[in-house]
Structure formats: C-alpha cells, structure tokens
C-alpha cells in the first residue's frame, strides 16, 4: 500500500502539533473507573452511557466532539446519555494521556484495529447496547456519509429514553448539513492541492511553490498543508532561504514543532546539500536522541543518518523502527519498505 506524501505530512504534523513540554501532572484515571462512575450516574438519571474513544491527534474525533457540543445538539445528548471520553492511541509526549486500560476496554467493545473515533452505548448495568460498526463489522467513525448517519441515528433512537421524533430529526438534519459542509471542504481541498501535488511529483518546484503561496494568501482555512508543501518546494528552489527559516514558526505551527516538521521534510528529499541533511539530523537528535518506541520518529533518524553517510547508525535506528512498526501493527507494506532500506544500508556499509 502506498501512502501519499500529503497523508504522511499530515500525520506527522498531527503528532508534532500535539507534543508539549513535559510537566508533572496526575496520571489519567483508569478507563474502567470512568465508565463505572458514568454508569452509576446514568442509573440515577434514567440514562445510558455514551463512551467515546478518542485522541488529541484525531481530527475526526474533534469533529465529532464539536458536533455533539453544538448548542442545539448538546441538550438532546445530555438528556439521554452520560457521555465519557476514553483517551487511547496517543503518541510521543502525549502518550501519558492515555487512560490506563483504555485499549483493553476498546478491544472488549469490538474496537480493536477499528480506528477512532470509536464509540459504544452502554446500559447502567454495563450491557453493550450498540457500537459504531456497520453490518460489515466496520467502524463508521464520524458519521458524515448517508449510511453512516443512518446507523448513528439508529444507535441513538434505539438506546435513548427521552429522545422524541422531533429531537431525532433535528440531530439527523444537522448531521446531513455538517456532512455536506465536510464534502464541500474535501472537494475544495482536492481542487486546491492536486495541482501542487502533481507539480511536486514532476519536480516542478517553482510551480508548486507559487501554488502554495496562492493558497496561503487566499484560502486561509485550507492553508495548513500548504505551509508544509511550500517548505518542501522551497528546499529545491532556494535551499539557503529554506534553511534560514529554521527556528521560525511554520504557518500556525510554533517554532519548536515547526523545526521537527522541517527536519522530516528535509530527510525525505533527494539531492539536497550536506548542510541541509546535517541541519535536519541535528534537529531530530535534539527531539529524540534515543529510541522512542515510535516507528516514524526512529525511521526519520535512520533516514537522516543515511543522508550524512553514517550507515551504521542508520541501520541501528531502522532496526528500532522495524520493531516499533511491528508492535504498532502498521501495514505490512510499510514494514517491507523499512526492511528494504535497512538491507540496502547494510550492503552499502
């Protein structure tokens, strides 16, 4: 399976954007205790429990939370459910935000390898009344498509004690309105970014750079990815200028996280100077000098070392990346690519 560059950049951006300074804080409560407390409350209020599994990096989780928090929707949900959030699948510096036992609870409710947001509706007696999977056993996540909205409404209508027909119709109408808006945004993104991705694939970096500048200037709501793609293009159009931007914000991304993104973009590029690759290696070593258990970060270090011809270190970190990727159960095609790189560096070394 091929993963597009824009998807990898977006995933990396999400992980970096979610990082924060390590501050001593109480450990999150166990998932089981959160659900148990909600069930006790629900029993006294003639409600059921809506359990939402989410993470800080998950954009669709935030979209679902935003929808459920709308002024016209929140009272309808609150009158029928005690809603709780269970944090799972965090990365990097936010891994300690995971609720202990969250992954096990997710698996027990049928959510293993289903992605997030995943949600379940439980009775006060801990009976599973509904989960967010269709008749094919697939998680619907955020209900934005027609069939997803239909299933979501079926879940609500079959498990709510106080939801009237009018209430249900209102929620359904608002979901359709939100879904239409999302579809329009998706269509606009494709229209805006496809020419840029086409230009990058043809190594037409000047055209890509100009296209990114146009998006940043005229489509601010769609400009997040444009800042990253612009930096990629700038590396090839004016490498010195691109390197001079290290230490500065990247769009809305603060300097510390922006430099991590820049470093990852640099090591993914061919035909840059040793100065660029050494700058990227320095940034990456400053962020995670040792094994992190996050395959993508170890992969970036491995690639950075290979770019400066330190193949022993490249093999070392690629081996760590392979082990972490296997533990994370990433697609086999990605693991195969990691193994292929490691083998080539071993032969070259």
Image (cartoon, rainbow, N blue to C red):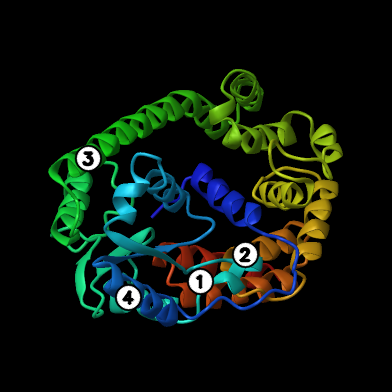
Classify the position of the C terminus by image quarter. bottom right
Q: CA distance from mark 4 to mark 3?
A: 26 Å
Question: Contact, CB < 8 Å: mark 1 with mark 2?
Answer: yes
Label 2 or label 4, whichever comes before in sequence order: 4
The disc label shown at residue 269, or none: none
Q: Identify the secondary structure beneath mark 3.
A: helix
Give the mark toward the camera: 1 or 3: 3
Viewer-proximal residue among 247 and 305? 247
Q: Identify the secondary structure beneath mark 2.
A: helix
Residue wearing tag 1: 325
Residue count near mark 4 (Cα–Cα under 10 Å), binned few <14, some 14–19, many ≥20: many
Residue wearing tag 4: 39
Query: Could you tell me which residue is drawn at 26 percent across and 76 percent down?
Result: 124
Q: CA distance from mark 1 to mark 3?
A: 39 Å
Q: Identify the secondary structure beneath mark 1.
A: helix
Residue 74 position within the rendered picture, expressed as x and y whole percent measured from the top left: 37, 48
Label 1 or label 2, whichever comes before in sequence order: 2
Question: Contact, CB < 8 Å: mark 4 with mark 1?
Answer: no
């Amino acid at each position: 399976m091929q993963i597009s560059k824009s998807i990898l950049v977006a995933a990396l951006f999400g992980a970096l954007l979610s990082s924060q300074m390590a501050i001593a804080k109480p450990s999150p409560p166990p998932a089981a205790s959160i659900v148990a407390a909600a069930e006790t409350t629900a029993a006294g209020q003639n409600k059921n429990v809506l359990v939402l599994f989410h993470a800080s990096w998950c954009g669709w989780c935030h979209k679902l939370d935003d929808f459920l928090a709308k002024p016209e929707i929140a009272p309808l949900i609150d009158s029928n459910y005690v809603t709780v959030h269970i944090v799972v699948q965090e990365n990097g510096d936010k891994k300690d935000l995971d609720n202990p036992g969250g992954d096990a609870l997710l698996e027990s409710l049928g959510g293993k390898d289903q992605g997030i947001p995943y949600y379940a509706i439980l009775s006060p007696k801990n009976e599973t009344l509904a989960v967010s999977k269709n008749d094919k056993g697939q998680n619907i996540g955020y209900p934005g498509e027609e069939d997803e909205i239909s299933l979501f409404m079926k879940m609500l209508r079959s498990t709510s004690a106080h939801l009237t027909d009018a209430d249900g119709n209102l929620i359904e109408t608002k979901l359709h309105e939100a879904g239409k808006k999302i579809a329009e945004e998706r269509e606009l993104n494709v229209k805006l970014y496809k020419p840029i991705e086409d230009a990058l694939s043809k190594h037409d970096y000047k055209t890509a750079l100009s296209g990114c500048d146009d998006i940043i200037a005229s489509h601010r709501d769609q400009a997040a990815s444009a800042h990253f793609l612009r930096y990629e293009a700038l590396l090839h159009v004016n490498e010195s200028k691109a390197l001079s931007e290290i230490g500065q914000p990247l769009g809305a991304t603060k300097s510390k996280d922006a430099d991590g993104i820049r470093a990852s973009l640099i090591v993914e590029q061919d035909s840059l100077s040793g100065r660029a690759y050494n700058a990227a290696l320095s940034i990456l070593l400053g962020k995670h000098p040792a094994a992190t258990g996050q395959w993508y970060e170890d992969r970036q270090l491995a690639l950075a070392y290979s770019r400066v011809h330190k193949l022993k270190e490249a093999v070392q970190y690629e081996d760590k990346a392979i082990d972490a990727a296997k533990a994370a159960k990433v697609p086999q095609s990605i693991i195969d690519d990691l193994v292929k790189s490691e083998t080539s560096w071993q032969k070259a070394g």
